[in-house]
Amino acid sequence: MSNIIITDDEKKLIKTIAKAALDEAVKNNKQLSINPSKLPQILKEKLGAFVTLHEDSELRGCVGRFEPNQPLYEIIIDMAISASRYDTRFQPVTEEELNKINIEISILTPRQKIDSVDEIVVGKHGIYVEYGGKNGTYLPQVATDMGWNAEEFFRSCCEEKAGIAPQNCPKATIYAYEAIVF
């Protein structure tokens, strides 16, 4: 899988952009607009990313995009807004919650098809599964956070996230990817 290098300063800038996008959307119902001319090159690359919101250590929203068709800074802005407003598992984030929201960013490497659950390295790989028109994904940190082995990680992603029937999980196509999480 490809290596993506993001410096600490670039990580801080990405989080600053995500926070500003979240604030602008919640407070003013507007999309953050920034001039990309002074941004570092990594933020102009077409990379997939997820933005995860937590409030008091509880998941509050998580939305991402694998197949980027726009620069990373635009993906971060869009996903911060989507995680705060359009994650159907949650009510939209309110202005009163903003100071309690922690933002986690996951910058993704491209997905690669793998042949077996045995190829999944827990804590390193995220997975994307698909079968019969259904699909789902778990970021790499999900397996670690839940204490799962590769088989548990795969089964939960298939059955609970994608809604694939247990008997069809062995037929699912599996893709692995890595994420830089901060």
Image (cartoon, rainbow, N blue to C red):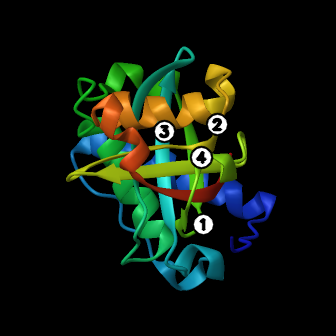
Q: Which residue is mark 2?
A: 150
Mark 3 closeness class: few <14, some 14–19, many ≥20 residues within 10 Å: many
First in residue order: circle 4 vs circle 1:
1
Q: Which one is earlier in the sequence, the residue at label 2 or at label 4? A: 4
Q: Is residue 170 above or below residue 159?
A: below
Q: Name the mark nearer the viewer: 1 or 2.
A: 2
Dot placed on the residue nearer the N-terminal end, 2 or 3:
3
Mark 4 = which residue? 117
Task: Tally the marks.
Answer: 4
Q: CA distance from mark 4 to mark 3?
A: 25 Å
Tag 4: amino acid: Val
Q: Mark 4 against mark 1, which lies toward the viewer?
A: 4
Side of 82 where 152 appears, left or right: right
Residue at x 33% of width, y 26% of height: 95
Element on which disc 4 rests: helix
Q: What label does residue 109 carry, if any?
A: 1
Q: Nearer the viewer, residue 87 or 66?
A: 66
Q: Residue at x 51, y 56 (%)?
A: 17
How far, Cα to Cα, is label 1 from label 3? 17 Å
Mark 1 or mark 3, which is nearer to you? 1
Position of residue 96 measured from the top left corner of the image (x, y, whole percent): 36, 19
**Residues tagged 1 and 3 counted as in contact (Cβ below 8 A):** no
